Image: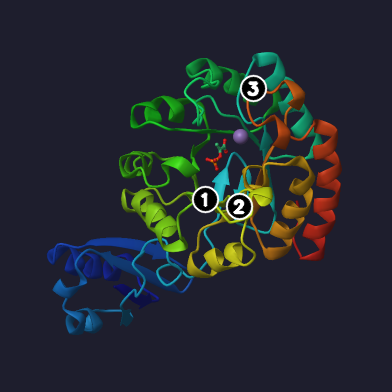
Amino acid sequence: MIIVLKNADEKAIEIVSKEIESKGLTPHVSKGKERTIIGAIGDERLLDVDRLKSLPCVEKVMPILSPYKLVSREFYPENTIIKVNGFEIGSDKVIMIAGPCAVESEKLLLETAHAVKKAGASILRGSAFKPRTSPYDFQGLGEEGLKIMKKAKEETGLPIETEVMDTRHVGLVAKYVDILRIGARNMQNFDLLKEVGRVNKPVILKNGVASNMKEFLMAAEYIMSEGNSQVILCNRGIRSYEPELRFPVLSGMTSLLKQKTHLPVIVDPSHSTGKKSLIAPVSRAAIAEGADGLIVEVHSCPKEAKCDGPQQLTPPEFEKMMVELKKVATAVGRGV
Ligand code: PEP
Ligand code: MN
């Protein structure tokens, strides 16, 4: 249920919140300029709607029809803007997150970090824990990789993001990085979602390759329901019948997500396509459609990469793409 208050002061907000709590539900308050919206999360049938309507400053009481509540635009009609070390995700500028698939060595990471910064990236990506299809493939450097990421942040000033795969690592990862990432394989790892929901840092949540939009948004709801509202949705495409396209980003999905939720939506052209030649076209399309950012794999020597070599751009390729993307962003009224 959402309760809309007009020109409400703290007292009015408290009265409504107490009424919600008295029925065993949890109030979530979002203050706008003129209106304050209080979401009552829990068993809505227990609420006394007539009583709520009679409380001071209450303008209307509406049920949230979607199964996801906190993530829905019905609950919070404005765009959520997430601030990371001076950068805003979800505002006018398209945010570029770039870096290698995995942190492989200090030398390679620092080279790539400086290169992506020079080309205009705002955030450095790099995984220290790798979810690999084969247990015999490179699994990541673990904490050593996190330390290297931190060093790259100190040298370049770029905020850093990395994947967290295990509930036992959430505290450790959160200690090192600015943004946590939940990968496609863990989109429905509910314990992990709850754990990152208790961290006060932004979380990039990638969709599972065989999940539908509702399941994706319910996963985001898990994070938000624990109190972390800094969720960035990442559209990384879904499994299709066309192996040449790997996991296509559906045309319209970014827009649909932005219509259904108030959360920023970024696109991953690298894991979606799996091939260098498609990264720039898919990125251009994503920005034209309204993505708030991209997360792109860049490696200073992709031929020697320990994972995802065929999809990692070289720094010059990334720089060239950035020039094109700036034009697209400008054409649709945004900057990069
Ligand atoms: C990644 O971004 O490093 C990754 C493994 O992607 P995904 O979880 O989308 O497969
Ligand atoms: Mn990768």
Q: Mark 2 points at which residue?
A: 266
Q: Which residue is drawn at 77% across and 65% down?
A: 332
Q: Nearer the viewer, residue 56 or 303?
A: 303
Q: Mark 3 points at which residue?
A: 306
Q: Which residue is drawn at 73% across and 39% down?
A: 121
Q: Name the residue under label 1.
A: 232
Residue 281 x, y percent position in the rendering:
78, 53
Q: Name the kind of residue labelled 3 in the image.
A: Lys
Tell me if the residue at label 2 has its CB under 8 Å from ligand 1: no
Q: Do the residues labelled 2 and 1 touch (CB within 8 Å)?
A: yes
- Total labels: the figure holds 3
Q: How crowded is mark 2: few (under 14 residues within 10 Å), some or many (20 or more)?
A: many
Q: Nearer the viewer, residue 37 or 216?
A: 216
What secondary structure is found at the residue carrying circle 1?
strand
Between discs 2 and 3, the one toward the N terminus = 2
Between discs 2 and 1, the one toward the N terminus = 1
